[in-house]
Image (spheres, rainbow, N blue to C red):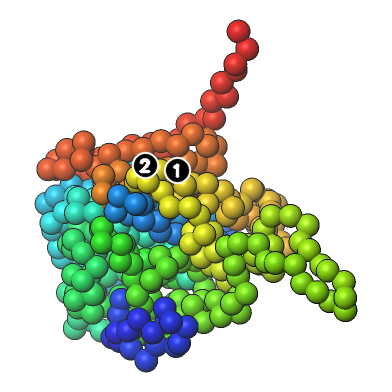
Amino acid sequence: MKISSDAAKGRRPCNIIYAPLRNAAFICATVFTCSLLFGLAAQACTGIRLIAADGSVVCARTLEFGIDLRSDVIMVPRGYARTGSTPEGANGLKWTSKYASLGANGVGLPFLFEGVNEKGLAAGLFYFPTTAGYMKYDPAKAAQTMAPWEIGSWILENFATIEEVKQNIGSIVVAPVVFEKWGFVPPVHFVVYDTSGKSIVIEYIEGKLHVDDDVLGVITNSPSFDWHMTNLRNYVNFSMVNVPPVEVGGVKLEGFGQGTGMLGMPGDFTPPSRFVRAVAYSTSVLPSRTGQDAVLQAFHILNNFDIPRGSARDDHKDAHGNIVADYTLWTSAIDLKTRRFYFRTYENSQIRSVDLTRMQVDSKDISTISMKGPEIIKSLNP
């Protein structure tokens, strides 16, 4: 394990530290059909952080995939018993949740892809193709081992701050566990935020743990986080304000309108381009007054990363002849101060919320709230 914040300064770090299936048969069949395409079809998630004038911290993200993951909002109570997965089965790390947590899952898993706990710590899972490389599995260390998709919930259920996560993340072994329903090892990395405004990115590359201080609070996908931070240096001409006119050979050249400070900003859906835009937008918006204001501001920023179905697609079809196209399944925001999870979906752009502080955090079982629901268009005619 390595520890450093050098990536935030544009240098490659020497040391680094820094989430019962419903309609299971249908989901399994669909996901398995797409499993061979998954590496190409789920690479577009974008995460940002905003800090309001009143100190509220809001983290927000999009989640993209090539098929409907049928996510729900789930609440994991205190005292919930867990057993981590290893390549041999359910014989991994055992723990009992110290803190209740709330957020969104996927494919009916009892683990959070994005969520917050009762202490205001938030964690999100992001796809990390071609770059993720987990630790070698040692059966003698099964009691320390878990699967990649279990890390987010382990963090939320055990820790209250970024510092606690830093101190403990090196104690676990994250092995290349095959997710049986998909038939492969999901390549993922994680971002974690706390109420102080601090943020870290957790990655496993070539069998080693890397944790970076994420000063800007932004994350996308591959390649590694420190690469994205270095790539920002290609945009040193970025400005929040318009550039002044220039004289060229006696001719005065003026911009055509607002936004000349962002000329040359990459506009495609690739992870490097989205990372640059996410930094530009999240750092240039006017400060929000409250956490509620920051939540709404975050949704406005993430409008720029919303992918309509068909705009990002592969050049081949699945076994049923369907076009494989990444699209934004849902967009979420979390107010770490209020412990409130906000979301909207591809089918329903209405922002809805669930408040962890109003949940039965000492219940025995996981609570589930559906994210489904159609768009309601309100007519204003009398």
Where is residue 293, by image quadrant?
top left
**Residue 292 numbered mark, or none:** 2
Considering every residue shown, the one lying at the far top of the view is 382
Of residues 338 and 148, which is closer to you in this image? 338
Quadrant where the N terminus is found in the figure: bottom left
Does residue 225 sit above or below 216 in this rendering? below
Please rate how many residues cluster around mark 2, counting C-alpha atoms within 10 Å: few if below 14, some from 14 to 19, many from 20.
some
Q: Position of residue 316 (x, y in %)?
A: 71, 61
Does residue 207 sit above or below 179 in this rendering? below
Q: Position of residue 90 (x, y in %)?
A: 24, 65
Mark 2 and mark 1 residues within 8 Å of each other at the beta carbon = yes
Asked if residue 328 can be seen in this view, the reply is no
**Residue 117 numbered mark, or none:** none
What kind of element bears circle 1? helix
Which residue is depicted at the point 56% across and 21% down?
378
Which residue is depicted at the point 73% across and 63% down?
315
Q: Mark 2: which amino acid?
A: Gln
Of residues 7 and 364, which is closer to you in this image? 7
Q: Position of residue 372 (x, y in %)?
A: 45, 35
Disc 1 target residue: 296
Please rate how many residues cluster around mark 1, counting C-alpha atoms within 10 Å: few if below 14, some from 14 to 19, many from 20.
some
Considering every residue shown, the one lying at the far front of the view is 250
Q: CA distance from mark 2 to mark 1?
A: 7 Å
Left/right placement of residue 72 relative to residue 377 reads: left
Does residue 23 sit above or below 116 in this rendering? above
Q: Mark 1: which amino acid?
A: Leu
Quadrant where the C terminus is found in the figure: top right
Which residue is depicted at the point 30% across and 76% down?
18
Which residue is depicted at the point 48% across and 62% down?
283
Q: Position of residue 284 (x, y in %)?
A: 52, 59
What kind of element bears circle 2? helix
